[in-house]
Image (spheres, helix red, strand yellow):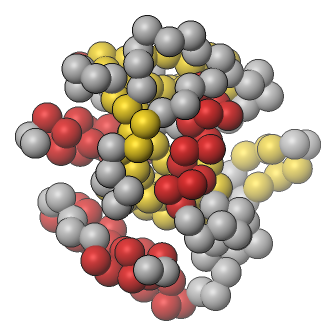
Amino acid sequence: MNLKEQIESYIPFDETEEKIKDYILKWIDTFDDVLTRENEFGHFASSAFVVNKDRTKMLVVYHNIYDAWIFPGGHADGEENLLSVAVREVEEETGLKAKILDESIFAISASPIIGHIKREKYVPAHTHLDVVYLLEADDKEALAFRKEESKGVKWLPFEEAIGDNIVDFIRPVHKRLIKKITSK
């Protein structure tokens, strides 16, 4: 199943995700290059909602550009298998080999990214069309992080995942993810 078909078959969790789903599908129909950063207006990213076995904590990384905590993830960079991107990003950003709990999309979001400097070049403001997958890892395993992208990695109790130390645009996403996982 291609990416558009995966998005079309995704059942939104709430009204917010219904609107995001429509937005993403319009984006796919409007642009040819939604999987690469060549599309400066916006492009796909893939993230992982990594939970512990007790479903009480989530894994977050301290992002250098945003100067706050966010779940692991990264750009698709041309790869249509966004689950593979999410799994790879978790390992690269945290050092953990997380277990995939479900191969289907767990959540979607569309996030405004402010203009910023990356690798000494200006990146204009754009949108990340984010596909989120559900993974699990042992919260007792050692964590590692890449200093060029992050200032740290940690397990965050759900009740702290929407606090002031979280990337602004991701707080409502965290809230939906937690609500979704705890309502199962």
Q: Position of residue 140 (x, y in %)?
A: 43, 9
User: Count of labels shown?
Assistant: 0
Q: Image point 80% across, 44% down: which residue? A: 117
Horizontally, residue 36 falls left or right of residue 14, namely right
Q: Say above or below: 97 vs 181.
A: above
Does residue 52 appear anywhere in the picture?
yes
Q: Position of residue 158 (x, y in %)?
A: 26, 23
Q: Quadrant of residue 4?
A: bottom left
- In-front residue for pair 99/120: 99
Q: In the picture, which quadrant includes the N terminus?
A: bottom left
Q: Position of residue 71 (x, y in %)?
A: 47, 35
Q: Image point 21% across, 69% down: which residue? A: 11
Q: Quadrant of residue 22?
A: bottom left
Q: Image point 21% across, 65% down: which residue? A: 12
Q: Image point 8% across, 40% down: which residue? A: 183
Q: In the picture, which quadrant includes the C terminus?
A: top left
Q: Position of residue 60 (x, y in %)?
A: 48, 26
